Amino acid sequence: MAIFQNQLWGFELTYPDDWTQKSNLGADGFAQKAEVFDQVGAANEQAAHMLVRGEFNGYRKPIPPLWNQYITKLSIMLGAKKLGASPFSMGGANGFEAEIQLPKKQNRRLWAGILARETTILHFMVSHPKEERAAFEPQASQIISSLRFLERVEGLATNANNLPLPPSYTSVLPSTLLPDVTEDGSWETYDGKSDLGALQAFYFRELPQHGWEIEEFIPFPNQVEINFARLRIRKNDILATLGILPSAEKKPLGKIVVKYE
């Protein structure tokens, strides 16, 4: 069995060695056949596949309305009828699941579920042609059943103050992200291409594991007059503000700014 670990959203899944795993556009995909995914990793909707997508719930909103929004949107998009939801629990997380009744002409089955744990919500979707149910569904169910949430990610890069850095983020000049900043040595800036919500989940989980106390956390989006996520953090005599700035993309990516006081 192979192990997939999403270090930003903080979860792990085990899948068969002969399956294919691809991540793209904010979702992690699993399939029995490599050709299910195109060159950029998106799934062929008519082929058998499973997708997992993270969502940041910084204000810990109740799950029932979030589930209703998700399943309603999915049903409208697919021209489907939604069925009654059932409680769904896995890996210490709780939520809902339902099989979506698709138009008969589509000849496929669709199952959807969400699980919530602390500030992270995972959306699951399993889709396959009806004739492939016996071969695909048991293994997809086994993958979902293997879900494990990580208390911390081992082996992360850190800066000189033991501040954890997300995978693939590199240091850049502060003026690259903050054109008007004063280069006085109190700023650190990091750039990469990760989902803004995933970075918030990453720091909410990893900062305490690296000895940092979160004194204030304003998630993004927010109802105050700042257009980024802000964390006031302290470690011993070091006080800093960590900002996660949205990029200009339609689905904003996160840029990291640290200001030491």
Image (cartoon, rainbow, N blue to C red):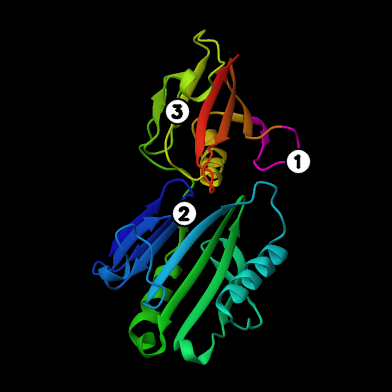
Q: Is residue 214 left or right of residue 168?
A: right
User: Mark 1 vs mark 3: which is more N-terminal?
Assistant: 3
- Please identify the quadrant where the C terminus is shown: top right
Q: Residues within 10 Å of mark 2 (few under 14, many from 20)?
A: some
Vertical relation: 13 (above or below) 82: above
View extreme (top): residue: 184
Q: CA distance from mark 2 to mark 1?
A: 25 Å
**Residue appearing at x 54%, y 39% in the figure:** 248
For image coordinates 42% across by 19% down, the residue present is 160
Which percent across, then down, holds residue 231?
62, 31
Instruction: Say the numbered circle drawn on residue 223.
Output: 1
Q: Amino acid at mark 3?
A: Tyr
Q: Please tell me which residue lies in front, 251 or 165.
A: 251
Q: Which residues are magenta?
A: 214-225
Quadrant the N terminus occupies: bottom left
Q: Position of residue 72 (x, y in %)?
A: 66, 72
Q: Amino acid at mark 1?
A: Gln
Which residue position is annotated with label 3?
190
Q: SS at mark 1?
A: loop
Does 193 appear above or below 106?
A: above
Residue 224 drawn in magenta: yes
Where does label 2 land, which residue? 26
